[in-house]
Amino acid sequence: MTTTMPRDFVCAVCGTSSSHMEIMSTNSFGAPDLDTRPAEMQRSTIGSLVQRCPGCGYCADRIDKRRPGGRGVVDAQHYREQLECADRPELSNSFICAAMILETAGDLSGAAWHTIHAAWACDDEGEIDAAVSCRLLAIRRVSALHASGHRLSPQPGADAALLTDLTRRAGQFAQALELVDRALPVTEDDVIRAVLLFHKRLIASSDRGCHTVEEALRGGS
C-alpha cells in the first residue's frame, strides 16, 4: 500500500509556497523493468519524484533545495520552452527541466536518472516518440557521466545493461547489440548476464517493448 501526505514547500528560487504530495510509504510486488523501473505500487508514485514551483517553474526533487546555477537555468529561454513543451506530457517536462538544473550543477548522475524518469512519464501517456526522444537524451547524459569517470551503478555491468535497454527501446538495434557484445565478455554477475543475453534475443527480433528482469531470468519464456 502507498500512503501519501500533502506538505508545503517554499521554493528556493522565488519563495513561492506550494503543496506537494510526499510518499510516506509504498511497496513493490514483482520484478522491475529492465531499465530498473519498479513494479506496482511503487511504479505509480513517479509523480512524487519531481516537484514544479507554480510561481517560477523551478523543477527539482524538492523545490525547497537550491541548486548551484538554478536561478539562471530557470530564467533561460530554452528552460522556459521545455517547461511548456507541447510535445511531451507535463510530468516529463518537469523531469527534463529538473535534469537541466542538475546538469548545470554538475550532478550528471541525477540528470541522467531524471531523464530516464521523463521517458517513463511518456510511456505512461502512450507518447512513444516523446519517450524515444527522452531515452536518446538519457543515453547522451549517461555517456557524459561515463566520460567524466563516473557511473550510475557501482555494480559491474549494470550500466551496460541499462544503456542497452535505453538504446534498444529507442530503436537503435545495431548500437544496442554492440553494447551487449562488449559487455558480455567482462560481465560475471549471473543476473546481469541473463539480462544482456535476453536483450540479445529482443534485439534479434527488433523488439522495442518494455520487459522485466523476471522475463530475462526465465529466458524470455
Image (cartoon, rainbow, N blue to C red):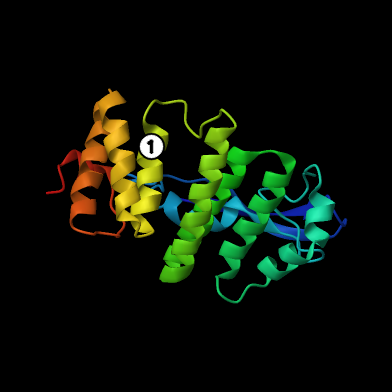
**Residue at image x 60%, y 42%?**
110
Residue 109 occupies quadrant? top right
Q: Would you name the residue on which mark 1 appears?
A: 160
Q: Position of residue 40 (x, y in %)?
A: 38, 52
Q: Position of residue 183 (x, y in %)?
A: 32, 32
User: Nearest the camera: 117 or 17?
Assistant: 117
Q: How many marks?
A: 1
Q: Position of residue 75 (x, y in %)?
A: 83, 61
**Residue at image x 47%, y 56%?**
135
Left or right: 57 as drawn, with respect to 214: right
Outermost bottom residue: 86
Do we see residue 28 in this rendering? no
Do we see residue 141 in this rendering? yes
**Residue at image x 63%, y 72%?**
85
User: Nearest the camera: 105 or 125?
Assistant: 105
**Given the image, on which type of amino acid does mark 1 rest?**
Ala
* SS class, disc 1: helix
User: Nearest the camera: 127 or 62?
Assistant: 127
Left or right: 21 as drawn, with respect to 179: right
**Residue at image x 67%, y 58%?**
97
